[in-house]
Each structure stands twice: as C-alpha cells, then as structure tokens.
Amino acid sequence: MMKNMKFKSLLLLCSATGVFFSQHSFADPTDEAPEVIGIPTAVKILEKSGYYDFRKIKVVREYNEIAVDARNKEGHRVELEMDLYTGEVVQEQLD
C-alpha cells in the first residue's frame, strides 16, 4: 500500500510539473515569424540590380535562400544565392 501511495504521489508531482512547464513552452502570440520574400519580389529586386533572362528560381528553405540562374549586367550566365528574408544577393558565381 505504501508503494502505491508513493507511486501516486510521484505521478501527481510529475503531472503538476508537466502542467507548470507546458504553460511556459508556448511562444508569445505577439511574436511573429520573419516574413520571407516571394519569387515575384525576388525577381523585381534582381531586375533592379541589372539581372535578367531568369532560367531557374528555387526557394531553398533549408538554407534560407533563393537560388537563381540568370544573366548579369555584362550578359554572363550566373548562379545567384539570395537571402530568403532580405533579398540580398549573398553569392554570385559565373555559370
């Protein structure tokens, strides 16, 4: 009987602790996730920077980037990586 009582006390303690911690595990509802830029916005940003002739535009959420195949101002085919949140071109390589 004493074992059963200890078990119930332990179970109650675990349940109460779980309720206490679960109340604090939720995000504040006023916190908002940062907005990602969409492909149309990415194209507009790139066009303003002189890029054109887009062949591939792919959102890669794993790396928080947009991968783009296009031509630069000089007409060279390039592979670009854009930041998914800011639209900044973080890398440009000749293709």
Image (spheres, rainbow, N blue to C red):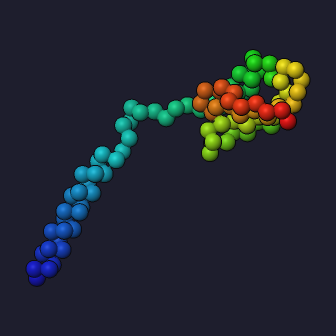
- What residue is rendered at 80% in x and 18% in y? 50
Which residue is depicted at the point 66% across and 37% down? 65
Q: Is residue 25 left or right of residue 38?
A: left
Residue that extends furthest to the left in the rendered view of this protein: 2
Lateral position of residue 21 relative to residue 64, left or right: left
x then y, percent, for residue 82:
68, 31
Q: 1 left or right of 79?
A: left
Which corner quadrant of the image does residue 77 belong to? top right
Q: Residue at x 89, y 23 (%)?
A: 75
Lateral position of residue 11 relative to residue 47, left or right: left
Q: Position of residue 30 (x, y in %)?
A: 39, 32
Looking at the image, residue 88 lies above or below residue 62: above
Q: Position of residue 1 (x, y in %)?
A: 10, 82
Q: Quadrant of residue 47?
A: top right
Q: Is residue 94 visible?
A: yes
Residue 28 coordinates in the image, percent (x, y): 36, 37
Which quadrant is home to the C terminus? top right
Q: Quadrant of residue 64?
A: top right
Residue 39 visible in the snapshot: no
Q: Kindly identify the residue that appears in the image at 23 percent across and 63 percent down.
A: 14
Residue furthest to the right in view is: 75
